[in-house]
Structure formats: structure tokens, C-alpha cells
Amino acid sequence: MSTPHRVVNPATLAPATGFAHAVVAASGQTVYLGGQVASRPDGVIAAGTLVEQLDVAAGNVVGALEAAGARPGDVVSLHIYTTDVAGYRASLRDLGAAYRRHFGHHYPAMALFGVTALFDPAALIELVAVAVIPARDRNEP
């Protein structure tokens, strides 16, 4: 998946695997997404495992992006909140596969936060994204 933004991974920092150290956003319109969990349209958490929840939550992020006129490649920042950091580390391969189903190989600036709880007690993960829709995608000069 391509991105209109400039991804920066300086050689002076540790290799960026599964994230970018910095993203320089193209000129455009910024979209701030609210936190997305693995909820169905009725608001009930749809999945049980951390991997299943990431898969549904990432789909919800993409749905919100599309409703705002953005695409997954427009994401410049992604914060991942989880109540199970150890489980996250243990499931990296499967989590990566679930992530790529929605975002391809586009890795924005990302951070993982371990939290004691999320608003919905059944939620294990919540995704908060910022995207920039490039001006050229909006038919602007």
C-alpha cells in the first residue's frame, strides 16, 4: 500500500520494524479518528482474542477513514492501547497479519500503550488514528 506522505526512518535510530519513526504529512485535510475497538454496529464487542479484536478494530478504523474520505495509506499516526501487553508481544506474528489485512505494508508513526482498562470492559485493544487526506485527492491545487 502506498502513501502520499514521506516516511522517515533515520539510520541513526534503531531499525523501524512494523512502524515508522516519523511521517511528514503531505499538505491536505487532517482527519482525527476517535478510538476504535472491536465493536459491531450495535456497540457490542464482536471478538474474544486480542488478535480477533485487533482485526475488527482495524476494520472499524478503515470504515471511519472511508466515511471521512480517507484511505488506510493516509494514516500518519496510530496509537494502540491494550490491556494485555504481554499477550500483544506473544501474538506479534498473528497481530501483524491482522494489521496487514486492513493496512497492507503501510506503517505510520505508531506507539503501543499498556493500560489497565478501556471504557468497555470486554475490549482488549483500542486504536486511535490520525490521517491526512492529500490536497490532490480532494481536487485542490
Image (spheres, rainbow, N blue to C red):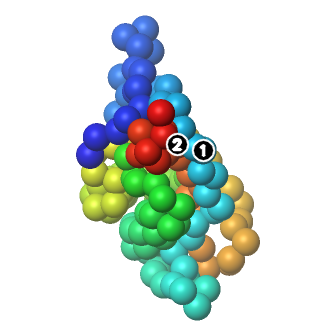
Question: Residue 132 — which label?
Answer: 2
Q: Which amino acid type corresponds to the residue marked 1 in the rendered image?
A: Thr
- Whichever of labels 1 and 2 marks the residue nearer the N terminus, that label is 1
Give residue 18's position: percent from left, percent from top.
36, 39
State the SS at label 1. strand
Q: Residues within 10 Å of mark 2 (few under 14, many from 20)?
A: many
Q: Is residue 121 above or below residue 115?
A: below
Give residue 113's position: percent from left, percent from top.
62, 48
Question: Residue 30 — which label?
Answer: 1
Out of 129 and 28, give the one closest to the viewer: 28
Give residue 65's position: percent from left, percent from top.
49, 60
Q: Is residue 107 above or below residue 82?
A: above
Circle 1/circle 2 CB separation < 8 Å? yes
In this rendering, the count of numbered labels is 2
Give residue 32's position: percent from left, percent from top.
63, 52
Out of 30 and 112, give the one closest to the viewer: 30
State the SS at label 2. strand
State whether residue 108 appears in this view: no
Mark 1–mark 2 Cα distance, whole angstroms, equals 4 Å
Q: Residue furthest bottom?
A: 42
Res. 20 image quadrant: top left
Q: Is residue 138 above or below residue 49?
A: above
